[in-house]
Amino acid sequence: MTHRATKIVATLGPASSNPALLEEMIRAGVSVVRLNFSHGTAQAHSERAQLVRQASERAGRAVAIMADLQGPKIRVGKFAGGAVTLQPGAAFVLDAARTQPGDMHGVGLDYKQLPRDVKPGDTLLLNDGLIVLTVDAVRGEAVHTTVSTGGELSDNKGINKLGGGLSAPALTAKDMEDIKTAMSLRADYVAVSFPRAAADMELARQLCAAAGADGGHMPGLIAKIERAEAITNLEEIVAASDAIMVARGDLAVEMGNAAVPALQKKMIRAARRADKLVITATQMMESMIANPVPTRAEVSDVANAVLDGTDAVMLSAETAVGKYPLQTVREMAAICLAAEEHDPAELDTAFTGQTFARTDQAIAMGALFTAYHLGGKAKAIVALTDSGSTALWMSRRSVRVPIYALTPKTATQRRMALYRNVRPMLMDIAGERDAALAQAENYLKSQGVVSSGDVYAITCGEPMGAPGGTNMLKICTAK
């Protein structure tokens, strides 16, 4: 059985909403399906979530659903002809009070706060940085600029400020309604767009808890790091989140393209150090929107994210609207697998000077250490887990031994679908320890994970079923 550690997140869209195709994509390696709440109605999201649940059940794979919130619309308004061409050196006005369609001299704003967020000398980047404006003056609701880099500017293109500083709140009224929708479809993760500080993530957690209270459901929260302020406040945002997303699009516009590769490595290290998950996203296989094979640069980009230690790599337009969604997943899976074969396990270095405050965490680390030092004999590391915490801690260290997490809870199984090197499995766990261990071994043999004579490490808690109660490690030889 080929075990790929790095997980794949795929965005669902018109190109991938066929039930048979989605099932094939899951079989090819998709572990998390992203629902983009920037598009579609609550009813459409509910229908797509049902589509994912049905396809994952047919494929026999645990798949998590990520609800990705739109966040603030920091955009220009519309133009009379749908677009204008701006010439370098020309004057151009961004006017929050303008109600008529835009022209070559100026345009209205969806983001009405812009005149209070900028000052003369600031640089504004429109349409992902393709258009560059320098602020000359702010007069009332009008921001007067000079075009530094021209080109075509069309309806509703995004606005970024070089270096950050736009005051738009991370959670809009629409996002608050969308959180209710996400809770109704029991999304496993909710991604928050444009958080600036820990307070944004804390508010999102409160809203999720309130919306999911009746069903007792609480998703994992993902902070999308795409503002300059989020880099400044990275440690506190990581601490307030369950995962972060290296969202390289808007981040590159605000910080500059050249800064992003080093920031990506910094963010992945910060997340793993804090025992949090991390997804690397944006343009990973962009050319496959239209082409059946990736570029060599894209192959290197995906492989480097894997070698950096990302839990998952994400596909956006490639699977949402691209011509080759299934081929893209297959290509990405192959790249991840090849990169992992050259990813050295450095467990001894990771353990140097480490102390663990919790028994269950110490047991998780002990299982990794023992399996790593069995000289290649260990076929698997197995965690009997209620909450998934033991499997999460195990997944923070690179070992060349696959981790299988057995849980009686469907929600835990789906949430663990994002964890690097963890294969989550659903199994009712017996109440007595020895019976549970025997049951786990029989289940693993039935799934082809171990065979008679194979050595594996297994962790569990006594008494069984107590969350956070993992306190036992056993090295077993399958009968």
Image (cartoon, rainbow, N blue to C red):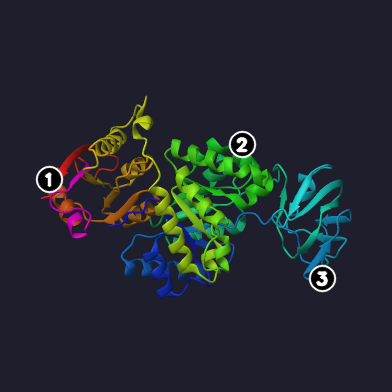
Query: What amino acid is at disc 3?
Result: Ala
Quarter of the image for the N terminus: give it.
Answer: bottom left
Residue in the foreground of this view, choosing between 87 and 83: 87
Residue at the disc numbered 1: 434
Q: How many marks?
A: 3
Q: Please name the residue shown 38% across and 60% down the image.
A: 63
Q: Disc 1 marks which amino acid?
A: Asp
Give x and y (percent) for residue 396.
39, 40
Q: Residue furthest top?
A: 353
Q: Give yes or no for contact between labels 3 and 2 (Cβ–Cβ under 8 Å).
A: no
In the rendered structure, which disc, 1 or 2, sits on the residue that comes first in sequence?
2
Q: Which residue is mark 3?
A: 80
Q: Which stretch is magenta?
A: 444-460
What is the distance, in whole Å, between disc 3 and disc 2 at their CAs?
A: 39 Å
Q: Which residue is mark 2?
A: 232
Name the spot of residue 379 as percent of width and height, x first. Answer: 23, 47
